[in-house]
Image (spheres, rainbow, N blue to C red):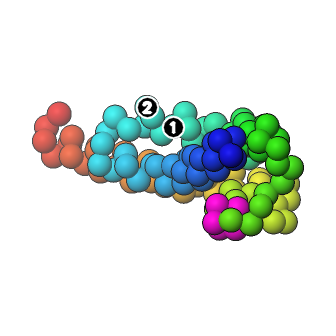
Amino acid sequence: MGYRLLADLVVILHLAFLLFTVLGGLVVLRWRWFPWIHLPAAIWGGFVEVTGRVCPLTVLENWLRRAGGGSGYERDFIDRYVVPIVYPPGLTREIQLALGVLLVVVNGAIYMIAWRCRTKVETTSGR
């Protein structure tokens, strides 16, 4: 039971990381130091998607499920609602590439807005 709980927690962590890589750039609009945290995560997320690699969180989750005596997903809340978001059915290489491009475009736009806002503030304050 402990391994299964840990595997479920890894899925939740994985989902949180995915959301952070896609939307974490929005925090840059508030805190100028945040790119130091977000950019490495976004680069890693994009790298995994574009290269088709398996995320270490997926490897960890699968290991925990096997260590707990499981071989697949059972149909509880986590498996029914969270797992399909992290591991969508029908995920193809083309979709992975599109998701990688979307990650770059969304965060590029957010960082461009943050950069323009910062430049405007520095220009008007005389820095």
Where is residue 83? Give x, y as percent: 70, 59
Relative side of 104 to 58, left or right: left
Residue at 45 percent of width and 53 percent of height: 110
Where is residue 60? Give x, y as percent: 72, 36
Q: Which mark is residue 39?
A: 1
Helix, strand or loop: magenta stretch: helix
Q: Residues within 10 Å of mark 1 (few under 14, many from 20)?
A: some
Q: Residues within 10 Å of mark 2 (few under 14, many from 20)?
A: few
Where is residue 17? Give x, y as percent: 56, 46
Residue 46 visible in the shown view: no
Where is residue 9? Give x, y as percent: 59, 47
Q: Is residue 100 magenta?
A: no
Residue at 65 percent of width and 41 percent of height: 2
Residue extending furthest toward the left: 125
Instruction: Classify mark 2: helix, strand or loop.
Output: helix
Residue type marked 1: Leu
Q: Do the residues under discs 1 and 2 have CB atoms within 8 angstroms?
A: yes
Q: Which residues are magenta?
A: 77-81
Q: Which mark is residue 108?
A: none
Residue type marked 2: Trp
Relative side of 123 to 51, left or right: left
The relative height of residue 36 versus residue 20 in the rendered view (above or below) is: above
The relative height of residue 97 versus residue 2 in the rendered view (above or below) is: below
Q: In the rendered image, which residue does mark 2 sit on?
A: 36
Residue at 46 percent of width and 49 percent of height: 24
Residue nearest the observer in this picture, 123 or 85 = 85
What is the quadrant of residue 127 in the picture?
A: top left
